[in-house]
Amino acid sequence: MSGRNHIIGVDLGGTTINVGAVPVDGGTVLGMHSLPTDAHIGAKFVVDRIVSMIRDVKRDAAREGGFDEDAIVGVGTGAPGPLDRDTGTVIETPNLGWRNFPLRDLIVKGTGLEAELDNDANAATLGEWWRGAGRGVDNLVGITLGTGIGGGIVLDGELYHGASDAAAEIGHMTIDSTGRKCACGSYGCLEAYASGPAIAARAVEGLKAGAESMLLDLVGGDLRAVTAEAVSDAIVAGDQYAADVMRETAGYLGTGLANLINILNPEMIVVSGGVTRAGKHLFDPLRREVRKRAFRPAAEACRIVRTELGGMAGVIGAAAVFRVARLGPL
Protein backbone atom coordinates (compact mmCIF):
# COMPACT_ATOMS: atom_id res chain seq x y z
CA MET A 1 0.00 0.00 0.00
CA SER A 2 1.57 3.31 -1.01
CA GLY A 3 0.99 6.88 0.10
CA ARG A 4 0.93 8.63 3.45
CA ASN A 5 -2.39 7.47 4.75
CA HIS A 6 -2.18 6.72 8.48
CA ILE A 7 -2.04 9.00 11.51
CA ILE A 8 -0.79 7.94 14.92
CA GLY A 9 -3.17 8.86 17.72
CA VAL A 10 -1.84 9.27 21.26
CA ASP A 11 -4.30 9.32 24.16
CA LEU A 12 -2.39 10.51 27.23
CA GLY A 13 -4.32 9.96 30.44
CA GLY A 14 -3.48 10.33 34.10
CA THR A 15 -3.33 6.54 34.45
CA THR A 16 -2.75 5.06 30.99
CA ILE A 17 -1.21 5.97 27.62
CA ASN A 18 -2.93 4.46 24.57
CA VAL A 19 -1.35 4.73 21.12
CA GLY A 20 -2.54 3.40 17.75
CA ALA A 21 -2.38 4.08 14.01
CA VAL A 22 -5.60 5.35 12.44
CA PRO A 23 -6.30 5.49 8.69
CA VAL A 24 -7.04 9.02 7.50
CA ASP A 25 -10.57 7.86 6.66
CA GLY A 26 -11.11 6.60 10.22
CA GLY A 27 -10.96 2.86 9.50
CA THR A 28 -9.59 0.06 11.69
CA VAL A 29 -7.01 1.11 14.29
CA LEU A 30 -3.74 -0.81 13.91
CA GLY A 31 -0.76 -1.50 16.15
CA MET A 32 -2.44 -0.58 19.43
CA HIS A 33 -0.20 -0.26 22.48
CA SER A 34 -1.18 0.61 26.06
CA LEU A 35 1.12 1.29 29.00
CA PRO A 36 0.78 2.92 32.43
CA THR A 37 1.51 6.65 32.45
CA ASP A 38 3.57 6.45 35.66
CA ALA A 39 3.56 10.25 35.88
CA HIS A 40 5.10 10.12 39.36
CA ILE A 41 8.43 9.15 37.77
CA GLY A 42 8.60 12.49 35.98
CA ALA A 43 7.65 14.33 32.80
CA LYS A 44 10.77 13.25 30.88
CA PHE A 45 9.95 9.61 31.57
CA VAL A 46 6.40 10.07 30.27
CA VAL A 47 7.57 11.75 27.06
CA ASP A 48 10.22 9.09 26.48
CA ARG A 49 7.55 6.43 26.94
CA ILE A 50 5.24 8.15 24.43
CA VAL A 51 8.04 8.43 21.88
CA SER A 52 8.96 4.77 22.34
CA MET A 53 5.31 3.72 21.96
CA ILE A 54 4.95 5.74 18.75
CA ARG A 55 7.95 3.96 17.28
CA ASP A 56 6.52 0.58 18.28
CA VAL A 57 3.13 1.45 16.82
CA LYS A 58 4.71 2.55 13.54
CA ARG A 59 6.46 -0.79 13.26
CA ASP A 60 3.52 -2.96 14.29
CA ALA A 61 0.89 -1.05 12.31
CA ALA A 62 2.99 -1.24 9.15
CA ARG A 63 3.35 -4.99 9.66
CA GLU A 64 -0.37 -5.51 10.34
CA GLY A 65 -1.52 -3.28 7.49
CA GLY A 66 1.05 -4.30 4.91
CA PHE A 67 2.41 -0.80 4.30
CA ASP A 68 5.73 0.99 4.78
CA GLU A 69 6.40 2.92 7.97
CA ASP A 70 6.68 6.11 5.91
CA ALA A 71 2.90 5.83 5.32
CA ILE A 72 2.55 7.53 8.73
CA VAL A 73 1.80 11.18 8.03
CA GLY A 74 2.01 12.51 11.60
CA VAL A 75 0.93 12.31 15.24
CA GLY A 76 -2.14 13.68 16.96
CA THR A 77 -2.04 13.79 20.76
CA GLY A 78 -4.80 14.25 23.28
CA ALA A 79 -3.47 15.41 26.67
CA PRO A 80 -5.05 16.67 29.88
CA GLY A 81 -5.34 20.45 29.85
CA PRO A 82 -5.86 23.35 29.76
CA LEU A 83 -3.34 23.82 26.96
CA ASP A 84 -2.30 26.13 24.14
CA ARG A 85 -2.83 24.44 20.76
CA ASP A 86 -0.87 27.07 18.83
CA THR A 87 2.34 26.44 20.77
CA GLY A 88 1.60 22.81 21.60
CA THR A 89 2.01 23.53 25.31
CA VAL A 90 0.26 21.90 28.25
CA ILE A 91 -0.40 24.90 30.47
CA GLU A 92 -1.46 23.01 33.57
CA THR A 93 -2.61 19.50 34.37
CA PRO A 94 -3.16 18.67 38.05
CA ASN A 95 -3.29 14.91 37.47
CA LEU A 96 0.17 14.88 35.83
CA GLY A 97 1.72 17.78 37.72
CA TRP A 98 2.83 19.64 34.57
CA ARG A 99 2.92 23.39 34.00
CA ASN A 100 3.85 25.16 30.73
CA PHE A 101 5.13 21.89 29.28
CA PRO A 102 6.03 21.85 25.52
CA LEU A 103 4.63 18.38 24.83
CA ARG A 104 4.03 18.71 21.08
CA ASP A 105 7.53 19.90 20.27
CA LEU A 106 9.08 17.17 22.41
CA ILE A 107 7.10 14.56 20.46
CA VAL A 108 8.24 16.12 17.17
CA LYS A 109 11.85 16.08 18.37
CA GLY A 110 11.64 12.50 19.58
CA THR A 111 9.90 11.01 16.54
CA GLY A 112 10.76 13.24 13.59
CA LEU A 113 7.05 13.35 12.73
CA GLU A 114 4.79 16.37 12.43
CA ALA A 115 2.41 16.62 15.38
CA GLU A 116 -0.67 18.36 16.72
CA LEU A 117 -1.99 18.65 20.27
CA ASP A 118 -5.44 19.05 21.78
CA ASN A 119 -7.19 18.35 25.05
CA ASP A 120 -7.69 14.62 25.62
CA ALA A 121 -11.41 14.93 26.30
CA ASN A 122 -11.82 17.14 23.22
CA ALA A 123 -10.12 14.42 21.22
CA ALA A 124 -12.30 11.65 22.65
CA THR A 125 -15.42 13.71 21.91
CA LEU A 126 -14.27 14.33 18.35
CA GLY A 127 -13.63 10.61 17.96
CA GLU A 128 -17.15 9.74 19.11
CA TRP A 129 -18.61 12.36 16.78
CA TRP A 130 -16.54 11.13 13.81
CA ARG A 131 -16.73 7.36 14.20
CA GLY A 132 -18.73 6.55 17.33
CA ALA A 133 -22.03 7.24 19.04
CA GLY A 134 -22.26 10.77 17.66
CA ARG A 135 -22.21 9.99 13.94
CA GLY A 136 -24.74 12.22 12.18
CA VAL A 137 -25.20 14.54 15.17
CA ASP A 138 -24.45 18.25 14.75
CA ASN A 139 -24.31 19.32 18.41
CA LEU A 140 -22.78 17.01 20.97
CA VAL A 141 -21.15 17.06 24.41
CA GLY A 142 -18.70 14.39 25.53
CA ILE A 143 -17.79 13.70 29.14
CA THR A 144 -15.00 11.34 30.18
CA LEU A 145 -14.99 9.83 33.66
CA GLY A 146 -11.47 8.74 34.48
CA THR A 147 -8.65 9.86 36.77
CA GLY A 148 -10.28 13.26 36.28
CA ILE A 149 -13.41 14.40 34.48
CA GLY A 150 -12.90 15.90 31.06
CA GLY A 151 -15.26 17.19 28.45
CA GLY A 152 -15.57 18.20 24.85
CA ILE A 153 -18.13 20.16 22.85
CA VAL A 154 -18.96 19.80 19.17
CA LEU A 155 -21.09 22.65 17.80
CA ASP A 156 -22.31 22.54 14.21
CA GLY A 157 -19.81 19.78 13.47
CA GLU A 158 -16.72 21.50 14.87
CA LEU A 159 -14.91 21.29 18.20
CA TYR A 160 -15.52 24.35 20.34
CA HIS A 161 -12.30 25.52 22.03
CA GLY A 162 -13.31 28.89 23.49
CA ALA A 163 -11.27 32.09 23.63
CA SER A 164 -8.15 30.48 25.13
CA ASP A 165 -8.44 26.74 24.41
CA ALA A 166 -9.95 26.21 27.86
CA ALA A 167 -13.55 25.37 26.92
CA ALA A 168 -15.36 22.26 28.19
CA GLU A 169 -13.49 21.78 31.46
CA ILE A 170 -16.65 20.06 32.62
CA GLY A 171 -15.02 18.43 35.62
CA HIS A 172 -14.33 21.82 37.14
CA MET A 173 -17.81 23.23 37.17
CA THR A 174 -18.81 23.92 40.77
CA ILE A 175 -21.68 21.82 42.08
CA ASP A 176 -21.09 22.63 45.79
CA SER A 177 -19.33 25.90 46.56
CA THR A 178 -18.24 24.74 50.02
CA GLY A 179 -17.70 21.10 49.10
CA ARG A 180 -14.79 18.72 48.70
CA LYS A 181 -11.40 20.04 47.64
CA CYS A 182 -10.47 19.24 44.05
CA ALA A 183 -7.00 18.46 42.66
CA CYS A 184 -7.21 21.79 40.81
CA GLY A 185 -7.21 23.62 44.15
CA SER A 186 -10.84 24.74 44.09
CA TYR A 187 -13.72 23.35 46.12
CA GLY A 188 -16.89 21.53 45.11
CA CYS A 189 -15.87 20.65 41.54
CA LEU A 190 -17.80 17.87 39.82
CA GLU A 191 -14.49 16.02 39.49
CA ALA A 192 -14.11 15.93 43.27
CA TYR A 193 -17.32 13.88 43.49
CA ALA A 194 -17.67 11.80 40.34
CA SER A 195 -14.21 11.05 38.91
CA GLY A 196 -12.92 7.51 39.34
CA PRO A 197 -10.75 8.30 42.39
CA ALA A 198 -13.54 10.38 43.94
CA ILE A 199 -16.04 7.52 43.60
CA ALA A 200 -13.53 5.17 45.20
CA ALA A 201 -12.84 7.64 48.02
CA ARG A 202 -16.52 8.04 48.82
CA ALA A 203 -16.98 4.26 48.80
CA VAL A 204 -14.05 3.81 51.19
CA GLU A 205 -15.45 6.46 53.55
CA GLY A 206 -18.64 4.45 53.89
CA LEU A 207 -16.77 1.17 54.39
CA LYS A 208 -14.68 2.74 57.15
CA ALA A 209 -17.92 3.91 58.75
CA GLY A 210 -19.16 0.31 58.89
CA ALA A 211 -21.13 -0.21 55.67
CA GLU A 212 -21.57 -3.85 54.73
CA SER A 213 -20.44 -4.63 51.20
CA MET A 214 -18.83 -7.33 49.10
CA LEU A 215 -16.39 -4.64 47.96
CA LEU A 216 -14.07 -5.69 50.77
CA ASP A 217 -14.01 -9.25 49.46
CA LEU A 218 -13.46 -8.08 45.88
CA VAL A 219 -10.31 -6.19 46.92
CA GLY A 220 -9.04 -8.81 49.37
CA GLY A 221 -9.73 -6.61 52.36
CA ASP A 222 -7.36 -3.88 51.13
CA LEU A 223 -9.22 -0.56 51.11
CA ARG A 224 -6.41 0.97 49.05
CA ALA A 225 -7.42 -1.34 46.19
CA VAL A 226 -10.98 0.01 45.99
CA THR A 227 -11.56 1.62 42.59
CA ALA A 228 -14.55 2.95 40.69
CA GLU A 229 -14.35 -0.16 38.51
CA ALA A 230 -14.51 -2.35 41.63
CA VAL A 231 -17.61 -0.44 42.70
CA SER A 232 -19.16 -1.13 39.28
CA ASP A 233 -18.24 -4.82 39.50
CA ALA A 234 -19.83 -5.07 42.94
CA ILE A 235 -23.02 -3.51 41.59
CA VAL A 236 -23.21 -6.05 38.78
CA ALA A 237 -22.80 -8.77 41.43
CA GLY A 238 -25.78 -7.39 43.35
CA ASP A 239 -24.15 -5.33 46.10
CA GLN A 240 -26.59 -2.78 47.55
CA TYR A 241 -24.00 -0.49 49.12
CA ALA A 242 -22.10 -0.15 45.84
CA ALA A 243 -25.40 0.60 44.08
CA ASP A 244 -26.06 3.37 46.63
CA VAL A 245 -22.62 4.88 45.96
CA MET A 246 -23.29 4.82 42.21
CA ARG A 247 -26.76 6.32 42.62
CA GLU A 248 -25.23 9.19 44.61
CA THR A 249 -22.60 9.58 41.87
CA ALA A 250 -25.36 9.72 39.26
CA GLY A 251 -26.97 12.54 41.22
CA TYR A 252 -23.80 14.61 41.07
CA LEU A 253 -23.33 13.87 37.38
CA GLY A 254 -26.97 14.59 36.63
CA THR A 255 -26.63 18.00 38.24
CA GLY A 256 -23.63 18.80 36.06
CA LEU A 257 -25.18 17.48 32.86
CA ALA A 258 -28.43 19.37 33.49
CA ASN A 259 -26.36 22.57 33.67
CA LEU A 260 -24.78 21.73 30.31
CA ILE A 261 -28.12 20.87 28.72
CA ASN A 262 -29.67 24.13 29.90
CA ILE A 263 -26.75 26.14 28.52
CA LEU A 264 -25.93 24.33 25.27
CA ASN A 265 -29.13 22.47 24.32
CA PRO A 266 -27.17 19.60 22.68
CA GLU A 267 -28.69 16.70 20.76
CA MET A 268 -26.54 14.17 22.58
CA ILE A 269 -24.24 13.67 25.56
CA VAL A 270 -21.78 10.79 25.28
CA VAL A 271 -20.48 9.42 28.59
CA SER A 272 -17.29 7.36 28.62
CA GLY A 273 -14.89 5.85 31.13
CA GLY A 274 -14.66 2.76 33.30
CA VAL A 275 -17.52 3.92 35.49
CA THR A 276 -19.96 3.25 32.63
CA ARG A 277 -19.50 -0.46 33.34
CA ALA A 278 -22.23 0.08 35.95
CA GLY A 279 -24.68 0.34 33.04
CA LYS A 280 -28.27 1.03 34.04
CA HIS A 281 -27.21 1.52 37.67
CA LEU A 282 -25.48 4.71 36.51
CA PHE A 283 -27.54 5.78 33.51
CA ASP A 284 -31.07 5.29 34.91
CA PRO A 285 -30.62 7.57 37.96
CA LEU A 286 -28.47 9.93 35.88
CA ARG A 287 -31.26 10.43 33.34
CA ARG A 288 -33.82 10.86 36.14
CA GLU A 289 -31.70 13.56 37.75
CA VAL A 290 -31.33 15.37 34.44
CA ARG A 291 -35.09 15.28 33.82
CA LYS A 292 -35.63 16.69 37.30
CA ARG A 293 -33.19 19.59 36.85
CA ALA A 294 -33.05 20.55 33.16
CA PHE A 295 -35.72 22.48 31.26
CA ARG A 296 -38.08 19.93 29.71
CA PRO A 297 -37.68 20.87 26.01
CA ALA A 298 -33.89 20.75 26.31
CA ALA A 299 -33.91 17.49 28.29
CA GLU A 300 -36.28 15.82 25.84
CA ALA A 301 -34.12 16.82 22.87
CA CYS A 302 -30.95 15.36 24.37
CA ARG A 303 -30.01 11.69 24.34
CA ILE A 304 -27.57 10.62 27.07
CA VAL A 305 -25.69 7.59 25.79
CA ARG A 306 -22.71 5.40 26.54
CA THR A 307 -19.59 5.57 24.40
CA GLU A 308 -19.47 3.31 21.37
CA LEU A 309 -15.71 3.52 20.93
CA GLY A 310 -14.76 2.97 24.57
CA GLY A 311 -11.02 3.23 25.14
CA MET A 312 -10.45 3.74 21.41
CA ALA A 313 -12.23 7.12 21.33
CA GLY A 314 -9.19 9.05 22.52
CA VAL A 315 -6.85 7.42 20.00
CA ILE A 316 -9.24 7.88 17.06
CA GLY A 317 -10.03 11.42 18.16
CA ALA A 318 -6.37 12.35 18.57
CA ALA A 319 -5.75 11.21 15.00
CA ALA A 320 -8.77 13.26 13.93
CA VAL A 321 -7.24 16.33 15.60
CA PHE A 322 -4.18 15.97 13.34
CA ARG A 323 -6.32 15.34 10.26
CA VAL A 324 -8.47 18.45 10.81
CA ALA A 325 -5.42 20.65 11.43
CA ARG A 326 -3.27 19.36 8.57
CA LEU A 327 -5.51 17.61 6.01
CA GLY A 328 -8.86 19.37 6.20
CA PRO A 329 -12.36 18.66 7.58
CA LEU A 330 -13.48 15.17 8.55
Image (cartoon, grey):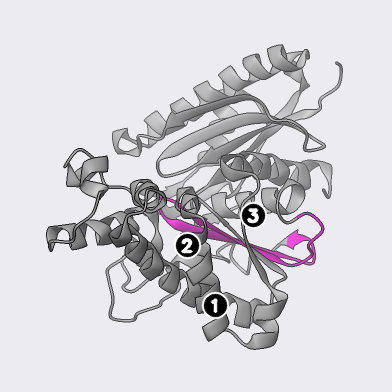
Q: Which residue is mark 1?
A: 290
Left or right relative to 79: residue 142: right
Q: Earlier in the sequence, mark 3 or mark 2?
A: 3
Of discs 3 and 2, which sits in the foreground? 2
Left/right placement of residue 174 relative to residue 166 reads left
Question: Which numbered dot is residue 255?
Answer: none
Magenta stretch, residue numbers: 135-158
Asked whether the viewer can see residue 86, the reply is no
**Cα–Cα span, label 1 and label 3:** 20 Å
- 3D distance between C-alphas at marks 1 and 2: 12 Å
Say if mark 3 contacts mark 2, CB within 8 Å. no
Q: Which mark is residue 125?
A: 3
174 versus 128 height, above or below: below
Mark 2: secondary structure: helix
Residue type, numbered disc 2: Leu
Q: Upstream in the sequence, badge 1 or badge 3?
A: 3
- x%, y% of residue 125? 64, 54
Does the magenta-highlighted stretch encompass residue 280? no
* Residue 137 lies in the magenta-colored region: yes
Q: Which residue is under mark 2?
A: 282
The three-letter amino acid code for the residue at tag 3 is: Thr
Amino acid under label 1?
A: Val
Please state which of the two labelled residues, at mark 1 or mark 2, is closer to the viewer: 2
Q: Quadrant of residue 23?
A: top right
Q: Secondary structure at mark 3?
A: helix
Is 250 positioned to the left or the right of 179 in the image?
A: right
Which numbered disc, 1 or 2, marks the residue that appears first in the sequence?
2
Mark 1 Cα within 10 Å, few/some/many (few <14, many 20+)?
A: many
Determine the image quadrant of residue 312. top right
